[in-house]
């Protein structure tokens, strides 16, 4: 069960943790077990320590590139996270194993909306995950690219799935409202779009992103509720 709307990903330092926590998002993401290029990878000990001082209302999410159930479960044990974002080519069979061994985990599988081959595999995974996240792949990176994709593609996927859809990829305080209203996701995920020129999280950008996202979600919910009411009449 997905328990957040706005996640700030790529927490990599005490500075990031402090700045983001003060902005009060619903969730934060820590990248561990990196197998692809990223500037935001941290070790499991950092994650466990960060969780110990994280306000209890903020959900910690483990984001990982590892591809086996054994590796994922080991990182879960080391970090203490109960929400896991699988940002890799891990197979449905491995995810099924994770689900059976640790049914208490919330599992999120990433797909790249700008890669047709990635989109085509979504139906293979929906029975084994709690939500999917639609991101952008670019420049040998599987996330944190700072690049958007065609939101019309994400909107079609979101409309056609029974599973919750999280939107990521090139989001920032300026485009988040339009992105939410166009795609109709249940949650959004941002990394580089709320950083300064040195790659550190920027409080004003984080705060603005959260504010704009929450306002857009409220508008979206009002529209959806109006449509439901109209259909009943």
Image: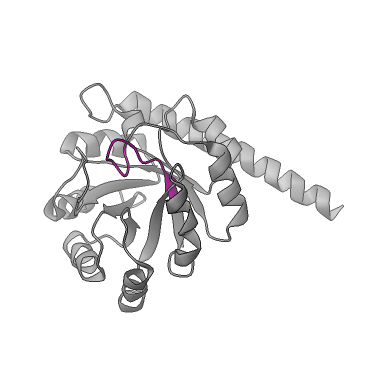
Q: Is residue 151 magenta?
A: no
Q: Which residues are magenta?
A: 133-144
The colour scheme used to paint the residues is: one colour
Q: How far across and how far down the image is residue 40, in percent?
A: 21, 40
Q: Is residue 10 left or right of residue 117?
A: left
Please tell me in which quadrant of the rendered image residue 222 appears.
top right
Q: How far across and how far down the image is residue 92, in percent?
A: 38, 68
Q: Is residue 135 magenta?
A: yes
Residue 184 in sight here: no
Please tell me in which quadrant of the rendered image residue 143 appears.
top left
Residue located at (38% from left, 62% from top): 107
Q: How far across and how far down the image is residue 14, in percent?
A: 17, 38
Residue located at (32% from left, 46% from top): 28
Residue located at (16% from left, 62% from top): 78
Main secondary-structure element of the magenta-colored stretch = loop
Q: How far across and how far down the image is residue 45, in percent?
A: 12, 54
Q: Which residue sits furthest right? A: 233
Who is closer to the viewer here, 34 or 141? 141
Residue 144 in sight here: yes
Q: Which residue sits furthest bottom? A: 100
Q: Please say if 79 is above or below 140.
A: below
Q: Is residue 101 left or right of residue 125?
A: left
Who is closer to the viewer here, 104 or 147? 147
Please tell me in which quadrant of the rendered image residue 97 appears.
bottom left
Q: Please say if 187 is above or below 94.
A: above
């Amino acid at each position: 069960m997905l328990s957040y709307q706005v996640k700030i990903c790529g927490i990599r330092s005490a500075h990031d943790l402090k700045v983001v926590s003060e902005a009060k998002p619903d969730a934060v993401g820590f990248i561990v077990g990196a197998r692809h290029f990223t500037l935001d990878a941290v070790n499991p000990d950092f994650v466990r320590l960060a969780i110990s001082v994280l306000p209890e209302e903020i959900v910690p999410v483990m984001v990982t590139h590892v591809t086996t159930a054994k590796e994922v479960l080991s990182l879960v044990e080391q970090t203490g996270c109960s929400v896991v974002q699988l940002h890799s080519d891990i197979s449905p069979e491995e995810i099924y194993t994770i689900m059976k061994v640790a049914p208490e985990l919330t599992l999120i599988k990433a797909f790249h909306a700008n890669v047709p081959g990635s989109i085509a595999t979504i139906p293979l995974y929906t029975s084994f995950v709690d939500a999917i996240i639609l991101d952008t792949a670019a420049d040998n990176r599987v996330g944190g690219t700072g690049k958007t994709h065609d939101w019309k593609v994400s909107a079609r996927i979101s409309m056609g799935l029974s599973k919750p859809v999280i939107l990521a990829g090139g989001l920032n305080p300026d485009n988040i409202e339009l992105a939410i209203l166009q795609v109709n996701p249940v949650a959004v995920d941002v990394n580089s779009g709320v950083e300064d020129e040195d790659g550190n999280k920027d409080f004003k950008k984080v705060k603005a992103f959260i504010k704009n996202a929450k306002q857009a979600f409220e508008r979206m919910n009002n529209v959806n509720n109006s449509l439901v009411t109209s259909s009943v009449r």
